[in-house]
Image (cartoon, helix red, strand yellow):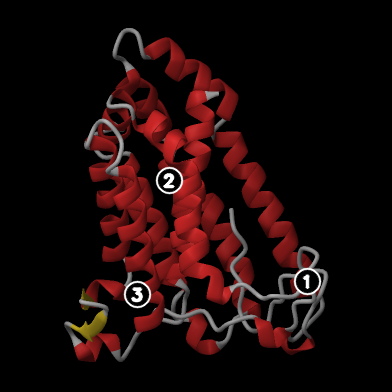
Amino acid sequence: MPYLISKKIAQYKRFELFVPACGAVKYIYTVKKAKNEATECIKGLVDINQLQEEMEKAKPTGDLDSVFKKYCKKTPEFKGCVSTFTDSLKPCLEEEEKQGMATVLNVTEQLAEFICFKEGDRIALFIAEGGPECLESSKDDVWKCVETVFKKHIPNTEEVTINDIPLLLFKAEQCKDFHNLQTCVVKQLEKCKEPTPANIIDSLFNFVKKATPCASYKFVDESVEAANKSQAGRTSSFSLSLYAVLIGVTLLRLTASVTN
């Protein structure tokens, strides 16, 4: 799980650089503890090695859907793992950013809903149509997409200060980054033998977009315009960029767990 960074939390040596503006030193340790607990919570729900073995056994008989059905039943517990972590961040977020916490959980729910649609039917189809192999062959190009789109947001120095941490936003620039990442990744996956993997990943991006204020933006010929200006004016201050990166990393990890 990636770290969510606000102006009051600096990501340097895993939260060791603490900004007093957060209000109390104890919060930095609370966040670290919650992050570790959330990680262990998720590991307790899904043993990657066991999942891999179950999928390998199910492939020959076409019973992958039964495997995903088993794990999709754990969705409520998974949401609990995530909310525990996001709740720990609230004391270190600015007031405007706190309003976006619901968006974070909404995106999480959308991802779970997408993966567990008809008890994992989409993911089963993705695997059956060579999705993992497609991702494996395209992983370098996919990562280049991530680096190209988000290079401007990465500090050039190892010493990360509070001024290097951008405010978490859901506005035109971040939505455009998400759009560019989606376009780039899908374009690379379309080079694969089967069209299904690219189509499913494209749908995944669209699913996430619907859970954010970015759904109100239209991108045409490198220009952006709000489809609903009143809604765009109330955009939450959470970074869609983080979720774009999360999608990329999740896809690469899925590839590793299935193809290894």
Q: Earlier in the sequence, mark 2 or mark 1?
A: 2
Residue type, label 2: Pro
Q: CA distance from mark 2 to mark 1?
A: 38 Å
Q: CA distance from mark 2 to mark 3?
A: 31 Å
Where is residue 224? Give x, y as percent: 25, 83
Nearest-to-viewer mark from 2 and 1: 1
Where is residue 252? Give x, y as percent: 50, 42
Q: CA distance from mark 3 to mark 1?
A: 27 Å
Nearest-to-viewer mark from 2 and 3: 3
Residue found 56% across the figure and 21% down from its top: 50
Residue type, label 3: Lys
In this orientation, which residue lies closer to the viewer: 230 or 105? 230
Q: Is residue 111 above or below residue 161?
A: above
Task: Determine which quarter of the picture holds residue 105.
Answer: bottom left
Residue type, label 1: Glu
Q: Is residue 34 above or below residue 169?
A: above
Left or right of 167 on screen, residue 145: left
Label placed on residue 158: 1
Residue found 77% across the figure and 83% down from its top: 19
Label placed on residue 176: 3
For disc 2, the marked residue is 76
Left or right of 192 on screen, residue 86: right
Left or right of 129 on screen, residue 168: right
Extreme residue in the top direction: 61
Q: Residues within 10 Å of mark 1 (few under 14, many from 20)?
A: few
In this orientation, which residue lies closer to the viewer: 12 or 23? 12
Residue found 52% across the figure and 16% down from its top: 53
Helix or strand or loop: what does disc 3 sit on? helix
The C terminus - image quarter:
top right
In this orientation, which residue lies closer to the viewer: 92 or 232? 232
Left or right of 71 on screen, residue 125: left
Residue found 51% across the figure and 22% down from its top: 52
